[in-house]
Image: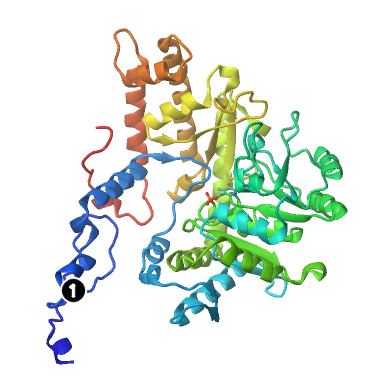
Amino acid sequence: MNRLLSRSLTRTPIFAARSPFIPPLRKMATATTPEFNKMLYAPLAEIDPAVQNIIDKETWRQFTGLELIASENLTSRATMEANGSILTNKYSEGLPDHRYYGGNEYIDELEQLCRKRALEAFHLDPAKWGVNVQPYSGSTANFAALTALIQPQDRLMGLGLPDGGHLTHGYYTAKKKMTASSIYFQSFPYGISSDSKLIDYESLSNQAKLFKPRLIICGASAYPRDWDYKALKTVAEREGAWLMADIAHTSGLIAAQQLNNPFEYCDVVTTTTHKTLRGPRAGLIFFRKDLEHAKDLEKRVNDAVFPACQGGPHNNTIAGIATALLQAAQPAFQEYAKQVIKNARSLAEALVAHGYQLQTDGTDNHLVLWDLRHLGLTGSKVEKVCDLMGITINKNAVNGDTSAQTPGGIRLGTSALTSRDMKEEDIKIVADFLHRAVQISLTLQKEAGTKKLVDFVRVATQKEDGKVGFEQVRALRDEVRQFASKWPLPGVDVANLKKPEGLHYE
Ligand SMILES: *Cc1c(COP(=O)(O)O)cnc(C)c1O
């Protein structure tokens, strides 16, 4: 006791870091803290400048670039605070009030709060729906849901990957079963119509008659239109199959009631929390509690998450989810979701006005699928050029692509730019950057002299006599950076942000 009392109780001054994040107060080591524990109190910038520098460079990249990857978003300062909190220390296997470890009174409170907020954010009646908030991410949520619903080697159907589906919905190639969803289950894809590029519900229904799936999965990673959940429910009911929606991409828009409601028809709904929902990286599984034929669904889902597929939950992440869900339930979030869609439409219109082709000619949600094939360009080349300019996009298959290695399209999304305050008119400027990037890509392809990506990258990154593409890339890059740096970045004090050492570009 005396020893304790005699310890110096002085504290460090407020953590003076190079980090632009506003740091929480840290308790200092006492005077008697042994050498082997002193490291526990040192701020990151001091004890690990290498990692700090990587964080600083990534912060700078996010600040000076334009984030158009459709699956990404910028989470809030509050969510990052929760995510970086002391809750990371606690083990809490099991569910609230049924844990395998002691000391979980506050973790129980947190998980209860998070579950309540999840149901509220999606406008669900707690008598009809329950939710498991422990999945580490979207893929683990999906595998746990499959584990809960069907037996090994049972049949499932999901949207094919080249048509916009996700790996975890049963993807396989001729040579290889690619994910656990095709390794442990028999999977069979449905697709989109080659005319309308919309989900081909009629073919799906016919395929289901033959294949007799135990589970139909809907939801996608690259589908710019909404889903007809009722049509899917009719097929699932006829075949006695479960209907599961994976709303990873669109959950923020669904919570904001800007898209059709999958909860009206589905038995299970999974989602990530870090895409349009704007939370930390994690997953959720919602399940019906009131099904006559499956009164045990709640137990099946919970047992599938733990112990079947996961160990202890990440409580710091669950705190971040809870905070993000609080935000998602507010009227302001509905305005955000509306703006995301307006921005995606604005982007689509601007590209069409430039004469480009979009799959389905437009969008109902946050994403646009841009078909470049008629220009004789691949998605990889445009992705590469955009990367050199700080515009982050991804190559993506478009309907009818023959090679999965060199997809002919680009996927764009407006969630992150909308989180940086951009509106339709600002998105028009971004669309203009994209237009110029494509025109420069055409020049570079000509100057490369071949269609090989290495030659293309060479002329884009090295100055060669008589060639103009290289200079054009740099000019547009400077304009993009200047434009991007005008906007705020959630969680970062950009007014005091300093350019870090070691960036890959000047
Ligand atoms: C992103 C995504 C996932 C996977 O999420 P991770 O968190 O990356 O595991 C699952 N399903 C769909 C439809 C997705 O778009």
**Residue type at the position of mark 1:** Ala
Q: In the picture, which quadrant includes the N terminus? A: bottom left
Q: Is residue 138 above or below residue 289?
A: above
Instruction: Kindly identify the residue that appears in the image at 45 percent across and 68 percent down.
Output: 315
Q: Nearer the viewer, residue 217 or 351?
A: 217
* Apparent side of residue 343 relative to residue 467 in the rendered image (left or right): right
301 vs 437: above or below: below
Residue under the point 55% across and 35% down = 411
Q: Quadrant of the C terminus?
A: top left
Q: Is residue 472 above or below residue 99?
A: above
Q: Which residue is mark 1?
A: 29
Q: Residue at x 62, y 62 (%)?
A: 285
Picture coordinates of residue 299 (x, y %)? 67, 71
Q: Is residue 249 left or right of residue 9?
A: right
| Residue 497 makes an appearance in the image | no
* Residue occupying image coordinates x 55% and y 78%: 96
Tell me if I can see residue 107 in this picture: yes
